[in-house]
């Protein structure tokens, strides 16, 4: 069945033969973008997965996927396809975000004039998923665990605690060396991998004691995956085992789960715990953002995980209520 796109494509092929032969399609452009980019591996993997899904969508629905067809009809069709594939709302949002990145790059390179991807209805959907943080009381339990007989867990615990009191991403934390310690060992200075910004973090007493334990260096790091497994084991030993109810939208349906808290602890819990505990301790938001490297308050506030009760307790001594 001839579509508007197919007719236009056939006309372009006939009228602009040489130019058309040298032109790139949207999916071919994405392949070249992935091949030539200097983005970090995780980003490239996400782009590759998005490209695979675009090819699968094209084959499954017999739809055209090219610069001129990235419109609201594509948006609705692609989301419907991904929903049937049983993806979560946030994962689908990630695919849409990447499509917008690809189209924006193509537009800037003058490969397309199609701007429908900037339509407010062509939005990146997201869902607020329950993310945990560890309170200072829980961190003290982890810090005070006697793990001398288990060097494997001992090193992971120490590295995790440093993350909880510096707010550094795991990728930045494992790159810290003695030369990153400044101001007579009272601060850590790091140039972040993600944002390429310098952050300077005061050294907490727990961090100071751990650094002394390792002669001024950080514990030896392991892979992120193994560290996530070991951290759960450590949190369980520390008795962080009460139940947490979570919900997530997958395949268009809301799923509810009940997990032990230690099952939800990951390396990223450290960064979230740092931001939340600093916030609860009345450290000014702008100061915490300088330490975490967040550029917008909107992105920073996603890290603040406090309950209604914690929020009310925080305000007990506020002048407005006294």
Image (tube, rainbow, N blue to C red):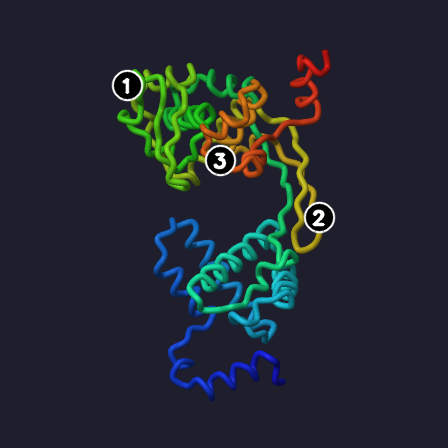
Among the two numbered marks 3 and 2 on one chain, the one whose residue lies closer to the N terminus: 2
Residue that badge 2 annotates: 254
Q: Residue furthest right?
A: 321
Residue 53: x and y in percent read 53, 63
Mark 3 burial class by Cα count in 10 Å: few <14, some 14-19, many 20+: some
Q: Residue furthest bottom?
A: 14
Q: Quadrant of residue 298?
A: top right
Find numbered disc 1 in the image and state the secondary structure of the residue it sits on. Answer: loop
Q: Is residue 229 above or below residue 76?
A: above
Mark 1 burial class by Cα count in 10 Å: few <14, some 14-19, many 20+: few
Q: Quadrant of the N terminus?
A: bottom right
Q: Viewer-proximal residue, 213 or 105?
A: 105
Residue 309: x and y in percent read 70, 22
Find numbered disc 2 in the image and state the secondary structure of the residue it sits on. Answer: strand
Please report the residue visible at 40 percent of the width from the left and 19 percent of the height from the top. Answer: 203
Residue that badge 1 annotates: 215
Residue 160: x and y in percent read 44, 27
Please report the residue visible at 59 percent of the width from the left and 64 percent of the height from the top. Answer: 116
Q: Are marks 3 and 2 in contact (CB under 8 Å)?
A: no
Q: Nearer the viewer, mark 3 or mark 2?
A: 3
Q: CA distance from mark 3 to mark 2?
A: 31 Å
Find numbered disc 3 in the image and state the secondary structure of the residue it sits on. Answer: loop
Mark 2 burial class by Cα count in 10 Å: few <14, some 14-19, many 20+: few
Q: Quadrant of the C terminus?
A: top right
Q: Is residue 194 above or below residue 306?
A: below
Among the two numbered marks 1 and 2 on one chain, the one whose residue lies closer to the N terminus: 1
Residue 49: x and y in percent read 48, 58
Q: Viewer-proximal residue, 73 or 295?
A: 295
Residue that badge 3 annotates: 294
Q: Residue furthest top?
A: 322
């Amino acid at each position: 069945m001839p579509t508007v796109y197919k007719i236009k494509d056939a006309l372009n092929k006939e009228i602009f033969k040489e130019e058309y032969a040298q032109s790139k399609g949207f999916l071919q452009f994405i392949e070249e973008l992935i091949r030539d980019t200097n983005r970090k591996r995780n980003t490239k993997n996400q782009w590759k997965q998005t490209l695979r899904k675009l090819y699968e969508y094209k084959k499954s629905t017999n739809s055209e996927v090219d610069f001129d067809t990235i419109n609201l009809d594509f948006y609705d069709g692609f989301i419907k396809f991904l929903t049937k594939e049983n993806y979560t709302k946030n994962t689908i949002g990630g695919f849409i975000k990447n499509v917008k990145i690809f189209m924006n790059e193509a537009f800037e390179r003058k490969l397309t004039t199609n701007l429908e991807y900037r339509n407010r209805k062509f939005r990146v959907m997201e869902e607020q998923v329950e993310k945990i943080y560890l309170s200072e009381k829980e961190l003290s339990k982890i810090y005070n665990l006697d793990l001398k007989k288990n060097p494997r867990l001992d090193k992971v615990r120490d590295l995790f605690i440093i993350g909880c009191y510096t707010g550094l991403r795991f990728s930045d934390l494992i790159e810290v060396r003695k030369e990153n310690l400044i101001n007579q060992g009272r601060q850590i200075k790091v140039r972040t991998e993600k944002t390429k910004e310098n952050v300077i973090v005061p050294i907490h007493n727990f961090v100071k004691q751990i650094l002394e334990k390792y002669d001024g260096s950080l514990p030896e790091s392991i892979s992120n995956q193994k560290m996530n497994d070991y951290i759960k084991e450590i949190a369980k030993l520390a008795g962080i085992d009460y139940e947490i109810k979570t919900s997530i939208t997958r395949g268009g349906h809301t799923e509810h789960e009940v997990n032990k808290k230690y099952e939800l602890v990951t390396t990223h819990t450290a960064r979230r715990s740092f931001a939340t505990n600093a916030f609860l301790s009345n450290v000014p938001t702008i100061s915490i953002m300088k330490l975490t490297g967040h550029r917008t308050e909107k992105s920073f506030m996603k890290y603040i995980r406090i309950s209604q009760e914690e929020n009310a307790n925080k305000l007990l001594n506020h002048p407005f209520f006294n």
